[in-house]
Amino acid sequence: MEFNLKGRRSVEDFFTTEILGASEACELLDIGKQRLSQLKTEGRLIPIKALPRENLFLREEVLKLKEELAEIRKIKGTGPKK
């Protein structure tokens, strides 16, 4: 994956569309923060930046994991949190 960012505007657009915070990742994956922490510990989702109170993830990697989790849920017959 390669990104060519030139200028502040392109960086802002990139961050707005391609970078997710932990809460956004949880919402997209339909999981809780504890499960997100577990996925990080297992190395299945690695933050691109870990800050003291926030982790940042690439949307592309979160969407890939979402597909994997959907397949596992389908096989196991389990559903998302709720």
Image (cartoon, rainbow, N blue to C red):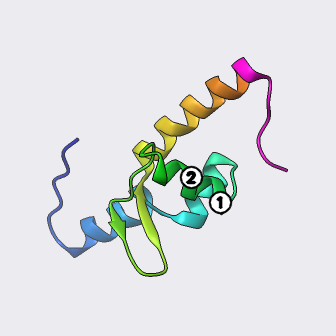
In the image, 46 versus 62, the foreground residue is: 46
Please indicate whether residue 40 sits to the left or right of residue 14 in the image. Answer: right
In the current view of this chain or complex, which residue is farthest to the bottom?
Answer: 52
| Mark number displayed over residue 60 | none
In the image, 63 versus 68, the foreground residue is: 68
Please indicate whether residue 10 sits to the left or right of residue 68 in the image. Answer: left
Q: Position of residue 3 (x, y in %)?
A: 20, 51
Q: Which residues are magenta?
A: 75-82
Q: Secondary structure at mark 1?
A: helix
Q: Residue at x 65, y 30 (%)?
A: 70
Q: Is residue 79 magenta?
A: yes
Q: Position of residue 19 (x, y in %)?
A: 41, 60
Residue matched to label 2: 38
In the image, 41 versus 59, the foreground residue is: 41
Alpha carbon separation for disc pair 2 and 1: 6 Å
Q: Residue at x 47, y 53 (%)?
A: 40
Residue matched to label 1: 34
Magenta: main secondary structure: loop
Work out whether 16 lies above or below 76.
below
Determine whether label 2 and label 1 are within 8 Å by CB. Answer: yes
